[in-house]
Amino acid sequence: MKKSIYSIFFFLSIFASCTYYNEEELFPNEVCDTENITYQQDILPIFEKACYSCHSSNTPVIYYGNLNLENFDHIQKVVDDGQLLRNIKHELDGLPMPQGGAKLSDCNIAKIEKWIIQGIPNN
């Protein structure tokens, strides 16, 4: 009898511990600073972490639409046609990116939007 109670408690504790949190839920007090956004300091690290596994010079040409986000001219193209924001915001008419991964944090999306509003400077 005790073994079955312990077993039930054990399995319930395992299932209860499986939850999903996003960055904002885990760190609610952190402020998203979108002032003085620069490509090198703010945007490039986001692309490196979230995009380069599929969109870099190491990606075979036949995959992922041959979009290399290491190349600033290519980034400018997807920004200009609206694809970048549609895709990272997971809008209905876009392709949710990163593909098969979690949506970028609201803060990272806000930084990219601010950078775009600033005219996508290569700074």
Image (cartoon, rainbow, N blue to C red):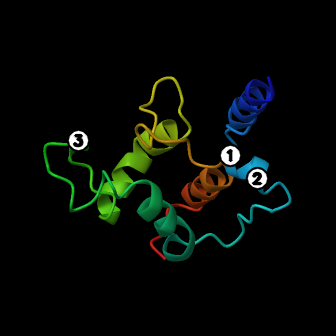
Instruction: Tell me the amino acid under the disc marked 2.
Output: Leu
Instruction: Tell me the amino acid under the disc marked 1.
Output: Asn
Q: Is residue 18 above or below residue 79?
A: above
Q: Secondary structure at mark 2?
A: helix
Q: Name the foreground residue: 114 vs 64.
A: 64
Which residue shows up at 45% across the image and 40% down it? 97
Q: Secondary structure at mark 1?
A: loop
Q: Position of residue 41 (x, y in %)?
A: 55, 76
Which residue shows up at 63% across the image and 57% down it? 114
Q: Is residue 123 above or below residue 32?
A: below
Name the residue at the front extreme. Answer: 1
Disc number for residue 26: 2
> Mark 3 or mark 2, which has the lower sequence index?
2
Using the numbered discs, state the Cα–Cα distance from disc 1 to disc 2 in whole angstroms: 6 Å
Q: Secondary structure at mark 3?
A: helix
Disc number for residue 65: 3
- Check if mark 1's residue and mark 2's residue have beta carbons within 8 Å: yes
Quarter-of-image position of residue 19: top right
Q: Which residue is mark 1?
A: 22
